[in-house]
Amino acid sequence: MAQSASITGKVTENGQPLPFVNILIKNTEIGTSSDENGYFTLTDLPSGKHLVMASSLGYISFSKSITVSEGQSLTLNIEMVPSAQSLDEMVVTGTLKPVSRLESPVPVEVYSPAFLKKNPTASIFDALQNVNGVRPQINCNVCNTGDIHINGLEGPYTLVLIDGMPIVSGLGTVYGLTGIPNSLIEQVEIVKGPASSLYGSEAVGGLINIITKTTLNAPEFFADGFVTGWGEYNLDVGSKFRLGKNADVLLGVNYFTYNQPMDNNGDNFTDLTLQDRISIFQKWDFERKDSRIFSLAGRFFYEDRWGGEMQWTPEYRGGDEIYGESIYTSRWEILGKYQLPLDEKVLLSFSYNDHNQNSVYGDTQYLANQRIGFAQLTWDKSVGQHDLLFGSAVRYNYYNDNTPATPSADNIWIPSFFAQDEIAFAPKHSLLAGIRYDYDKRHGNILTPRAAYKWKVSTNDILRLNIGTGFRVVNLFTEDHAALTGAREVVISEELKPERSVNVTLNYLKKIYSDNGTFIGVDASAFYTHFSNIILPDYDTNPNLIIYDNLDGRSVSQGISANVDIAFANGLKFLVGATWQDVSNTENDIRQKQILTESITATWNLSYTFRDLNLTVDYTGNLYGPMRLPLLGDLDPRREYSPTWSIQNIQFTYKGIPNFEAYAGIKNLLDWTPNRGNPFIIARADDPFDKNVTFGANGNAVATPDNPYALTFDPGYVYGPNQGIRGFLGLRYTVF
């Protein structure tokens, strides 16, 4: 035995330890698995040539020929390559219960921290720019607030979840996607299409679920910091530790700052909002009898951001001398899950957040407070071929602001009941049927049914058909930036009804494994969504007004989307996606494309690892087709439609030092900004308080020698970032 050889090493993915990977010597009974830190040892090897093989669900199999002699001890480090974004991950978003992504009747897209690192950003909001069919939309050239579009639908149609809890909505949508350290994210799950039968209001166009790590798979300590050529600084720091016998704690802190005003387009306004932001996240996992779940998490977020004229300082806040938009935001959240001590699977989930916003837009002040409480009880039960889920939920919404549209605080309780049944009626066929009932005292009873059919044609071919409904109760002043700035007067022409949607999505998933280790994955969908009672802002009837009413007609979002994922055994990987979509509104038989909605979008991610150099190169980018833009009248000289434009990035990551990753690259390689081809972006930037604008009897601006285009100040003509080319440099340190 003393003369036998041994092999020791570590299994990693993108430099991070990979636990529980199966490792064996072919044609022998010698084998083991990597421990929780990725280490393994193979002993009692006879001398000679052996084939070492490693395999794990969701990864391309690894093999390497090794020759050993008697008594020799070799070191072999194994780098595993994910198979097309790990098509076999566990997902929870589509059905509210953990299932394999391949077995889920609802198509769910999954993105790991490794995907987010390929184009490092200071927030998940920015990172989603490389997801096909998802676009972060900046809504204001001055304050740079924004929202997330899915399949061309406006941000309020997207529900954002943290660990499955609808903790982010309305006033706090963009802030919920900011300040969570990427190193604490286990995965991001995205469902495109209505999901109101499980999640209620706001899950009309789709949802994004940010799932944080448990203490079991989080690093002992991590630090990740980067700086850009524009003077942006971002730092993520975190650790995990044990308290007492039964509690594990995960702590993460994110800090971001940018304090160098820049005006490259020459309009005397900041191109990028200046920010100071801190976010503190803490999660507690408690050990309980029979491995029952009990976790608590909390987050505190504070941000001070401003944009405006280059001469602006805080002493001008709220005045009419120098224009600035200044936003102070403080927000805290708590969420948790507790599995009841019963033989049945009964889970209590809850969340609460308080969002306070103190904003000024020029001399217009906007003070708002929103509180959202949520509690949900679910019972998961399997009976024969039936996989059942029953649930009851209650949601509390509090909202108040200082605008005339909110004469008193809004307090709403919305109780809900839902049920779903997934029936495996044949070996390759299953049907999911579900329905939800909500009661809102403002709108009465609301029913949202859905159905999903899955045909597993073969192990590597899956066809899904989903039919779902959604509803949304609208609060304009938490969602539309233009309604807050005071640049236009808001007119609500009727009592607004809740919006309803019906969606049909056909999805096809194909996996191809070749003998040489190459993997090809294809994920394609066709979608159609019909909206009724849709509430749209009318910018065109009167350029000085925003008129809100329920559309007397229909709104349709339709299109096709596909992702192709290729991973070669030599370390070369492609992830390419494209979407064609047509989003339009029809009223009085007049059909018009929806404003700020692109016709085509494409994303790509090309990666190659030079294993001998411990160097990985990532080339990422996106492309957006023409979209209709909000003009201020017939004389407005700016483009009515945006051009086709692209943001492209490159990154180099070196992993040759244990526990460290050094990365550097260039963002926006083409130096593209939306002022190209336009005489200006911000209307009347030289007169932001409209002091020199002449108005006619109808309230519209009149063309004068000083104002030949009859414009008023408006920062809402925006469809892409004003930030041009810049370099970045970063360093990560991780201890498992």
Image (cartoon, rainbow, N blue to C red):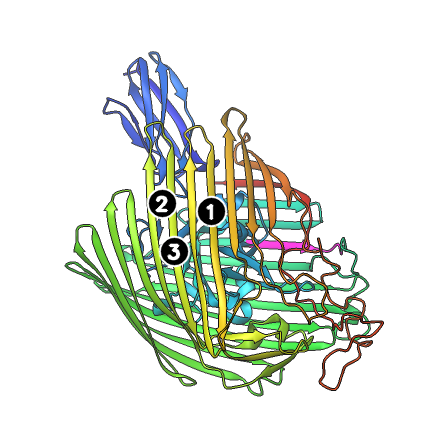
Is residue 401 or residue 430 the one in the foreground?
A: 430
User: Which range is magenta?
Assistant: 253-261
Asked whether residue 57 is in view, the answer is: no
Q: On the rendered image, what quadrant is the N terminus found in? A: top left
**Amino acid type at mark 1:** Gly
Q: Residue furthest right?
A: 705
Marks 2/1 in contact by CB < 8 Å: the verdict is: no
Badge 3 density bin: few <14, some 14–19, many ≥20, Cα 10 Å: some
User: Is 254 inside the magenta-drawn segment?
Assistant: yes
Name the residue carrying label 1: 577
Asked whether residue 681 is in view, the answer is: yes
What residue is drawn where x is 36% and y is 18%? Answer: 66
Q: Earlier in the sequence, mark 2 or mark 3?
A: 2
Badge 2 density bin: few <14, some 14–19, many ≥20, Cα 10 Å: many
How many labels, in total? Answer: 3
Marks 1/3 in contact by CB < 8 Å: the verdict is: no
**Amino acid type at mark 3:** Ala
Mark in front: 1 vs 3:
3
- SS at badge 1: strand
Is residue 453 or residue 396 the one in the foreground?
A: 453
Q: Residue furthest left?
A: 384
Badge 1 density bin: few <14, some 14–19, many ≥20, Cα 10 Å: many
What residue is drawn where x is 32% and y is 27%? Answer: 53
Name the residue carrying label 2: 87
Quarter of image, res 660: top right
**661 to 188, vertically: above or below:** above
What residue is drawn where x is 74% and y is 60%? Answer: 680
